[in-house]
Amino acid sequence: MADIENGTIVKAHYKTGIYIGEVMEDRNRFYLVKVLAVEKHPMQGDLHNPGKTEDVFFHQRKALSFNEKANVQKEAVHIYEQQEVPDYQESLKHAVSKLKAKLTRRETEFNQNALHQLESLEKQYFKTK
């Protein structure tokens, strides 16, 4: 795989979320990526025990914020193919809506806990000033 140049717009898979961002720096095995939009909101819960609710700490996982920088493994960074980068706030709303829809399809304890965490995050993300 060829190296991606600084300034290139990419899709970056980071933990359980997917972001659209700009490559800021090549850091050997990683790219430093500045977040511009959210494509997929991170899943809630324990990353090491997906789908589990008993005997685990059920984490609330926020999406990376606008212009936040993350070290993303090179294998998880791909050129962004679309023409325009979506607006951050609109992309975050869309990503939250998609995850909520997925969590409401099946009524499980995990999905209910994840939905509760996501609704709490939604209030933080979109509070009116």
Image: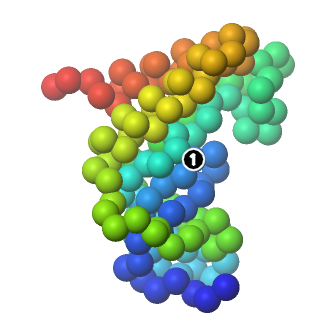
When the figure is inspected, residue 69 is found, relative to residue 113, above or below; the finding is: below
When the figure is inspected, residue 27 is found, relative to residue 49, above or below; the finding is: below
The N terminus appears in which quarter of the rendering? bottom right
From this viewpoint, which residue is outermost toward the left?
129
Circle 1: element type: strand
Residue 74 at x, y percent in the picture: 63, 73
Residue type at mark 1? Gly
Residue 29 at x, y percent in the picture: 67, 77
Q: Quadrant of residue 6?
A: bottom left
When the figure is inspected, residue 123 is found, relative to residue 70, above or below; the finding is: above
The residue drawn where x is 61% and y is 22% is 103
The C terminus appears in which quarter of the rendering? top left
Residue that carries the numbered disc 1 in the rendered image: 17
The residue drawn where x is 44% and y is 59% is 20
Residue 55 at x, y percent in the picture: 83, 19
The residue drawn where x is 40% and y is 25% is 122
Q: Note whether residue 113 is visible.
A: no
- Viewed as shown, does residue 88 lie left or right of 121? left
